[in-house]
Image (cartoon, rainbow, N blue to C red):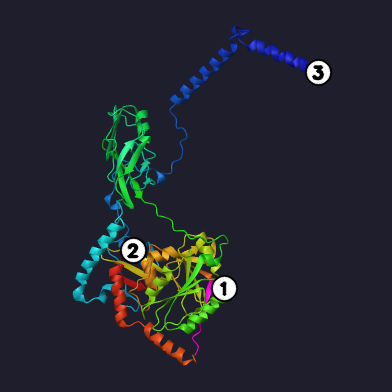
Amino acid sequence: MLEQRTRRRSLKFFRKRLRPPWLLNSPVRTTALVLAVVSVGFLLWISWESQDFERPQPRIDSSRRPFAPTQALDPSRLRLLPKEKHSQLFRYNGLWLFPKKQCECQNVNHPGNYNYQDAYNPSDVEAVKARRQREFWHFQRREGLPRPPMLVAQPNLPFSYPILGVEVMPLHTVQIPGLALSGSGASTNQIILKASLGTLNSLADTPDDVVQGRGGNSLIISTNDLELLNFILQHVTYTSTVFRLSAVDIVSMELGNQVARFPVTIRHPITPILYDPGPERKISSLVTVATKTFLRYHKLQILLRSIRDHYPDLRVIVADDNAQPEKIDDPLVEQYTMPFGKGWFAGRNLAVSQVTTKYILWVDDDYIFTNDTRIDRLVDVLEKTDLDVVGGRVGGNLFQFKLLLEPGEDGDCIHWRAGSFHPLPDFPSCVVTSGVVNFFLAHTHKLLSVGFDPKLQRVAHSEFFIDGLGSLLVGSCSDVGIGHQPKSPISDPKEATAERSYRGFRANTQEQVRFKLALHFFKNHLKCFTRG
C-alpha cells in the first residue's frame, strides 16, 4: 500500500516537471495541446509527400485494363462469326431458328415433306400467289401487322418517360406516368410532346403561354421553372381519338435535338364469356362430351355405354352425317343430323357449336371410357394453368407433336416434330406441346374461335392445330387415358358392311392430298412442310 502511494506521487511529480509552465493550470491548455499535435502531424505529412522515393503501388491486372480511347482500333478486329459457325448456333430440333428473309425446307421430295405450291399447275402459280398476297395484306391490316417499329433510346437523355405499360381504351383518356426532365442547363426549357392517334393535355392550371396546344396532337411546354415544368409533365394526359380495337401510338417527347419516344397502346377490353358451373361445381356442369359419327353406330353405342358406366349424368353431343340416321335412345345425348357425308370437320363445328359448358371433351366414336378416363384431372389442369387444350393417352399411346414455324417473305415454313417442348409446371405428368390426339379437353370458346375448316371432309387432324398455331396453347398429360375399341373380326353382316364403307371414305386420294396442300398454301400462307 505504501509502495503504490509512493509511485503515484512520483508520477504526479514528473508530469508537473515535464508540463510547460505556460500550461500549468491554464484554462486553454487542452486547446493548445490539440493545435500543437495537429501542426506537427501536418508538417510530417508535407515532409513525407516531398520525398522522392517509390511508394507501394496497387497491383494492376494488365489483361483487364480498359481500352484507351486514343488507341487506334484495328478494323480487322470488327468481324462477325464465320457463316459456318453462325449457322450452327440457335438451333432447335435441327432447325436454324434465326431471323432471315426466306425460310427453306430441306428434302421436300422426302415422303411426308411437301412444297405446297406443287399442288398447283405451274402455269397457275403466279396468279395464285398474287391473290394470296392481296389477302395476306388484308389479314395483316386487320391484325395490326406489321407491328410498330422498334424504339431505340438515345444515350444520356435528360428525360424520364414510360417505356411500356401505358394503355388506354378507344376514345378514353389516361394520365401518362413518369414524365420528367432532370435538367437541361438551358435558361428556358421547351418540351414538345407529339401524338398521332390521340390528343395531349395537362391537368396543371397554367397560363396559356406556358402550355400551348392543349387538346391537340402537339403539346408545347415552355418555362424556365424546372419545378413547374415537371409538375406539368406529371399531369400530362393522352386521349384516344380513333376507335380502334387494338393499335399502338408512338408518342414523342422533344427537347431541342433530343427526342424520346414511347408507346401508348390503344386496346378495347375483351368482353368476358363466363360459364356458370353451378353451386356444386360438378363435372357434368363443367364438361360436355362431343363426337362425330359416320357409318359406325355399333362403335358409337359402345362409346355411349362406357360413358354412362363412368359418368352417368354427363351430356353428350353427337354430330351425325349418315345417310339413314338411327335414333339414339338416351335422354342425355343430343343428336344433330347433317347431309350425308358432309364431312369430318363440318361435323366437329356443328357439335362444338351446341356446347354450353365451360369445357368440351372431344372423343372419336370408336373410343371407350376406362378407369383411366379421369376427366377431373384434365379439368384441374385447365383450371390451374393457361393451357387452352390438354390431351391424354389413347389405347396406351401418347401422341403429341410440335409445330415449329419459320417466317418467310414468300410464305412460312412449318416443321412437324414428335414430342413436346418442356414439362408443364406443377403437373409432373404433363408437358407443353403443339398438337395431341383426338382425345382432349378444351375451353369451349377457344375451340369456337379457331374452328374446324369444313373444306376438310375426310382425313384431317394436324390441320386444326396448324390453324390454331399462335392462338391455342396445348398440353398433354400421360396420367389420363381412354381406350380404343379393338379391331376384332365382325360377325354381324350389317356392321361388317358399314366398316368396309367407312374404310373407303377414310382413305385419302391423291386429289384430296393435293387439295389439302393447296389449302395450306393459300389459307395459311405456308410455303412448305417437313416431318422429322
Figure check: 78 above or below 159: below
Determine which residue is flagged by label 1. Answer: 312
Q: Which mark is residue 30?
A: none
- The N terminus lies in quadrant: top right
| Horizontal side of residue 321 vs 282, given as left or right | left
Determine which residue is flagged by label 2. Answer: 87
Decide whether residue 301 is among the magenta residues: no
| Horizontal side of residue 522 vs 395, given as left or right | left
Q: Considering the numbered disc 2 on the image, is that residue within a helix, a strand or a loop?
A: loop
Crowding at label 2, few (<14), some or many (≥20) Cα neighbours within 10 Å?
some
In this rendered view, identify the residue nearer to me: 226 or 130.
Answer: 130
Determine which residue is flagged by label 3. Answer: 1
In the rendering, at what x and y percent does residue 264 appear? 34, 46
Magenta stretch in the rendered image: 480-488
In the rendering, at what x and y percent does residue 52 appear? 43, 28
- Residue type pointed to by label 1: Pro
Figure check: 214 above or below 407: above
